[in-house]
Amino acid sequence: YDKAEALQGNQFEKEHYTFAGWKMPNGKILKDGEEVKNLTSKKDAVIRLTATWTEKDYTGESYDIILHANGGTGEDVELSDAVYGTAYQLQANPFSMENHHFVGWALRAEGQVVYEDESSIVFTHPDQLNGASLELYAVWEKDTYAVSLVNGSESSEQSVAHGETVVFPEEPEKRGFTFEGWYTEEGEKWEEQAPVEQAATLYAKFAPVSYTFAFHGNG
């Protein structure tokens, strides 16, 4: 007490941050190794000094971006020319998936789209990434096809995803005819559980009701 001594040098570390000094209970910041005395009002009293940190400035430093096909065709792509603090335009999607189309990039395999194709992104600190690098996962949606249902002068259209089935309306009726099903332009019957793999126009087909007449001589 009443004798100046240098503070012990900081032994702590915090990733992505720089040590900024020791904070006293009254808010005053002491420098690392600073000579101090009489930090308390009583001799042999204990004072708690708390390490303070400032975020490290990463401006101008590079970081990696890894593009994952996420079920698509193609090897992962690693981009190493992104720089903190500078806008970076993502390259066009290099992957493909059969019967699917690319809709953007997610931050995890099952995630939602956060960046569209060729988006411009800016990061200033590693804590903003989702790992040691920025990991982006391709998001895919099934291709869809227009299916038209035609019943005489009436028609309707629906969008059906690849491999899904058509949603048919209630069986149509026509006086004097029996409904036989929905048929393609080529005359093939479309089974209700058939998967859709391309655009199609289906036509309601009817057959006339047949009757049998019996004649009696009546005597």
Image: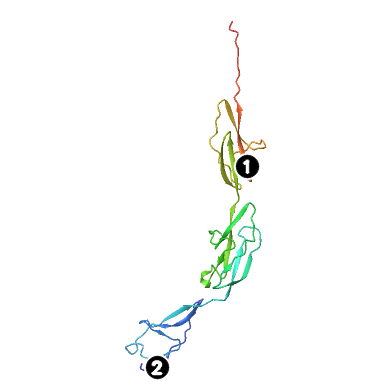
What x and y, as percent, mark residue 194? 62, 41
Q: How many marks?
A: 2
Q: Residue furthest top?
A: 219
- Observer-nearest residue: 156 or 25? 156
Q: Where 166 sits versus 87, above or below? A: above
Q: Quadrant of residue 72?
A: bottom right
- Quadrant showing the N terminus: bottom left
Q: Residue furthest bottom?
A: 3
CA neighbours of label 1 inside 10 A, class few (<14), some (14 to 19), many (20+): some
Q: Quadrant of residue 7?
A: bottom left
Task: Look at the numbered disc 2 and give the secondary structure of its residue.
Answer: loop
Tell me how the rendering is colored.
rainbow
- Observer-nearest residue: 94 or 137? 94
The residue where tag 2 is placed is 4
Q: Amino acid at mark 1?
A: Ala
Depth check, mark 1 against mark 2: the one in front is: 1
The residue where tag 1 is placed is 200
Q: Residue furthest right?
A: 186
43 on left or right of 143: left
What x and y, as percent, mark residue 115? 55, 62
Q: Residue furthest left?
A: 42
Q: Earlier in the sequence, mark 1 or mark 2?
A: 2
| Distance from Cα at disc 1 to Cα at disc 2 | 90 Å
What x and y, as percent, mark residue 185? 65, 37
CA neighbours of label 2 inside 10 A, class few (<14), some (14 to 19), many (20+): few
What x and y, as percent, mark residue 218? 58, 7
Q: Amino acid at mark 2?
A: Ala
Q: Could you tell me if the residues under marks 1 and 2 are in contact, i.e. CB atoms within 8 Å?
A: no
Task: Look at the numbered disc 1 and give the secondary structure of its residue.
Answer: strand
